[in-house]
């Protein structure tokens, strides 16, 4: 089955507010067996909404609408949809009771304006809102499944998962098609290189394989569409195995796994500890490592040494070394990694120093030049990198590459 997700609200079209509901919904729908083929954002204009709703009815089997269920004048989703479906809006006693119960539970007076939130198209079935006030609803009209949810992300998610919509969709779909997906995360390879290595796999139609380039690396998306979950999983597993064989150690994680999680697990497995000295990344690596619960078992300390003086005072980097080679140099990165390891008493010492920009670069040392050092025992290895992008992109790419250097050392 094919679906369209429609997000309503002029605030989504004027900048400053990102539309995120469709990301959650598309994933949930796919898990049920419904493929999202269109995403649409429409402002708070009745004619525009009606046009969007009519178009969706012509081209998909399932329509999920978010937003426009509040008590104010610009909350017009119900009215616009009812007009397109040629159905009257009627007051739902169950919806009204649910709304008033929320106000009573919060000890607040009930404003009569909220009555309009209990108006549903004739034949619609009520969806409970476990996280808010506005009720949602769904109906099946000419074999098309149409659902309307609140625009507030927490309410939308709760209604989908616990308000009755997911179960209704499962019953409607009836297991006609099974989708299974997986995302492989890579580091250290460009998008063009990944494409070169798995180009023939990407040209196949079963399963669908695509690439997404990010600041932290390239993701390989695999989507299998079959007549059963077992067939979809078997095809997915075979394809993943072949892709991993082609890409090798560049693949570091699957789906929601982050690189810092993988590094932490490897450190625990090897019974090793790590300390970090950061200059241009300003604590990004330490922040990512400590995002993982239990990281105190392997991450001893992170030191931000932004100035030359701090590199000398906190890490023991000789001042004359900085003067001779500059703070952004292979020699200083090595001294930083060695210094933080010795002072922290850890098995590994990681360092990053570079020019994030937008200023500060020279012909000899341009913006994006970054040195990453890893001290392991008496040995210190330093890698030179030239990252492109904005200041934030250089910093993010430096942090990701530094963590990947630790990962590759741990699996070597």
Image (cartoon, rainbow, N blue to C red):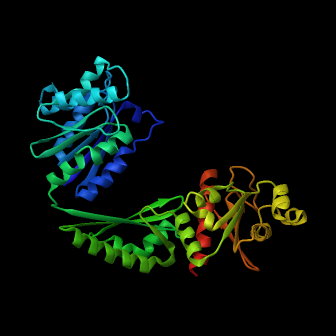
Q: How many marks on residues?
A: 0
x%, y% of residue 272? Answer: 64, 75
The residue located at (20%, 40%) in the rendering is 55
Nearest to the observer: residue 125 or residue 79: 125
Q: In the figure, 87 relative to 167: above or below?
A: above
Quadrant where the N terminus is found in the figure: bottom left
Residue 328 in the figure: left or right of residue 79 = right
Q: Residue at x 24, y 57 (%)?
A: 32
Name the quarter where the C terminus is drawn: bottom right
Residue furthest to the left:
142
Q: Quadrant of residue 393?
A: bottom right
Residue sitting farthest toward the right: 320
Q: Is residue 346 above or below residue 119?
A: below
Q: Is residue 37 left or right of residue 219?
A: left
Q: Is residue 242 above or below residue 370?
A: below
Can residue 228 be seen from the camera position used here? Answer: yes
Is 229 left, or right, of 20 in this rendering? left
Q: Quadrant of residue 105?
A: top left
In front of the other: 185 or 116: 116
**The quarter of the displayed image where residue 188 is located:** bottom right
Up-down relation of residue 330 to residue 286 (above or below): below
Give how far across and how far down residue 354 sits, in percent.
72, 60
Percent coordinates x, y for residue 14 in the rendering: 43, 33
Question: Where does the image place residue 163, in percent across and percent down from the top left?
Answer: 26, 43
């Amino acid at each position: 089955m094919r679906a369209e997700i429609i997000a309503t609200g002029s605030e989504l079209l004027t900048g400053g507010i990102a539309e995120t509901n469709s990301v959650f919904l598309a994933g949930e729908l796919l898990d049920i067996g419904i493929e999202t083929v269109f995403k649409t954002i429409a402002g708070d204009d009745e004619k525009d909404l009606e046009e969007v709703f009519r178009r969706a009815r012509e081209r998909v089997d399932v329509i999920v609408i978010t937003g426009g269920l509040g008590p104010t004048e610009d909350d017009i989703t119900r009215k616009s949809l009812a007009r397109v479906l040629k159905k009257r809006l009627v007051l739902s006693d169950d919806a009204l009771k649910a709304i008033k119960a929320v106000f009573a539970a919060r000890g607040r007076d009930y404003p009569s304006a909220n009555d309009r939130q209990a108006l549903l198209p004739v034949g619609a079935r009520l969806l409970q809102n476990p996280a808010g006030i506005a009720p949602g609803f769904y109906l099946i009209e000419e074999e098309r499944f149409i659902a309307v949810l609140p625009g507030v992300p927490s309410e939308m998610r709760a209604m989908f998962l616990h308000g009755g919509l997911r179960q209704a969709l499962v019953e409607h779909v009836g297991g006609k098609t099974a989708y299974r997906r997986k995302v492989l995360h890579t580091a250290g390879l460009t998008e063009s290189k990944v494409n070169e290595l798995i180009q023939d796999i990407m040209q196949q139609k079963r399963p669908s394989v695509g690439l997404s380039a990010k600041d932290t690396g390239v993701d390989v998306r695999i989507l299998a569409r079959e007549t059963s979950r077992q067939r979809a999983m078997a095809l997915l597993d075979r394809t993943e195995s072949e892709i991993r064989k082609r890409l090798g150690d560049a693949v570091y994680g699957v789906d929601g796994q982050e690189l810092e999680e993988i590094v932490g697990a490897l450190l625990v497995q090897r019974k090793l500890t790590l300390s970090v000295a950061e200059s241009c990344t300003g604590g990004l690596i330490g922040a990512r490592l400590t995002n993982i619960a239990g990281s105190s078992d392997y991450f001893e300390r992170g030191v931000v040494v932004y100035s030359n003086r701090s590199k000398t005072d906190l890490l023991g980097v000789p001042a004359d070394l900085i003067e001779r080679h500059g703070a952004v140099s292979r020699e200083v990165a090595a001294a930083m990694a060695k210094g933080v390891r010795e002072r922290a008493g850890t098995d590994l010492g990681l360092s990053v120093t570079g020019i994030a920009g937008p200023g500060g670069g020279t012909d000899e040392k341009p913006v994006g030049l970054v040195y990453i050092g890893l001290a392991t025992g008496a040995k210190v290895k330093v890698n030179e990198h030239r990252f492109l992008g904005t200041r934030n992109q250089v910093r993010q790419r430096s942090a990701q590459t530094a963590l990947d250097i630790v990962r590759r050392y741990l699996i070597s």
